[in-house]
Amino acid sequence: MLTQPFADAVVEAEKVIAEAPHIQTEQDLIEGYDYLAGSIRASLQLAWAYERDFPYFVTSTGPYTKMGLDNPDALYFHSYLRDDAEYVVTGTRGTTRDLSFQVLNGDYSPVEVPDSLAAFDDRELEINADGRFELRFGPDRGKAGPGYFVLGKGSAMLVVREVYSDWATERRGTLRIHRADRLGAAPEPKDRTALEKRYGVAGKILLSRLRTFLAFPEWFYLKLPVNTMTEPRRTPGGLATQFSSAGHYDLADDQAMIVTVPASEAPYQGIQLGSRWYVSLDYLNHQTSLTADQARVDPDGKLRFVISERDPGVANWLERLGHARGYVQIRWQRLSRDLTPDDGPEVDVVDVGELPAKLPYYEQARVTPEEWTARIAARQTAVATRMLG
């Protein structure tokens, strides 16, 4: 059977899910199978998008194809490259808070993170008054300069991120890529051998994807003391002008984690929760993430987030949705300076009943049930608009 290699990989992938070391409950396993479904969809898409001579951007992750503690505020796109060819990227700059580009020398694997060979944001682009831009990636060092970025040896993938802060008002731009010497030509039609190879590649992507991101937390999270967060540090992988603070929590249902962090001057600042499958929690229908624009800032200029299972009745509640254990991450992007420990979070674990005494501006933080429903409705509307934009 032509599809047999992929079918075999799906069977092996189910074993990877079922044997994951963090599984403790039936709900953990159910979420794992849901994660597997998204990974199957994504792996087929990635295998069929592997076009280095006739490339195009594909969505790397989304609400139903999650991986790698995906940022609910970001749209991720990628295209494959050859390091000896020249590529033209054209587009229009949307109104999102950040637009960044990164060239990788491969993909993530269970044993290593790919090197970032170049990383920059749109401040390095020449953008016309109407928002249009063009940039080139290629091997010719003699062309290096504004609008031309040199592809280092091993360059294999171009990743683009559009990051939102105000989901309701910001709008995505447009993006297109082509190989400079192939525009107007067409690829050879696929034959049976090519399709067999694609199905085999899809199976390898699936298994690598699952194994990689089950190993990832051991590298960056689980060796940290529980119920703490790190000081701001450059995000692993070489992202341009991004810092992050990471941690993992373990909370009883009557406990809450208060994360206090200064509201930054950075154009983008956001916090999110993730499951032990190392993916975002449901951010469409629940408030499991917040940006500085979405959050309520206290009069002292600080953001105070409450991570808890029980509803504390405050605007900056992050719902953990039955996940007694999970990950929490803060990101800052488009920075113009390095962050210091003073820019980072402080963490305090308290009983939920103590929150009125522990939150210094508790009365200002409160929301009514009607206000909470409106917040969730705004999220659902904004994500739906973003996905179709």
Image: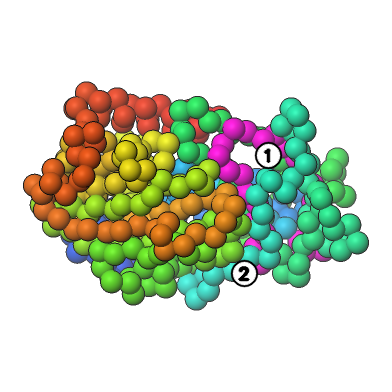
Label 2 sits on what residue type?
Asp
- Rendered location of residue 172, percent (x, y): 58, 34
Above or below 380: residue 260: below
What is the crowding at mark 2: few (fewer than 14 residues within 10 Å), some, or many (at least 20)?
some
Q: Which residues are magenta?
A: 82-107
- Rendered location of residue 320, percent (x, y): 24, 49
Asked which quadrant contains residue 356, the reply is top left
- What residue is shown at x 24% (from left), y 52% (from top)? 258
Q: Is residue 111 visible?
A: yes
Q: Nearer the viewer, residue 381 or 257?
A: 257
Residue 263: give its label.
none
Q: Is residue 204 visible?
A: no
The residue at which mark 1 appears reads as 175
Labels 1 and 2 touching (C-beta < 8 A):
no
Label 1 sits on what residue type?
Leu
Is disc 2 placed on a helix, strand or loop? Answer: loop
- Rendered location of residue 365, percent (x, y): 24, 36
What is the crowding at mark 1: few (fewer than 14 residues within 10 Å), some, or many (at least 20)?
some
The residue at which mark 2 appears reads as 115
Q: Nearer the viewer, residue 125 or 63?
A: 125
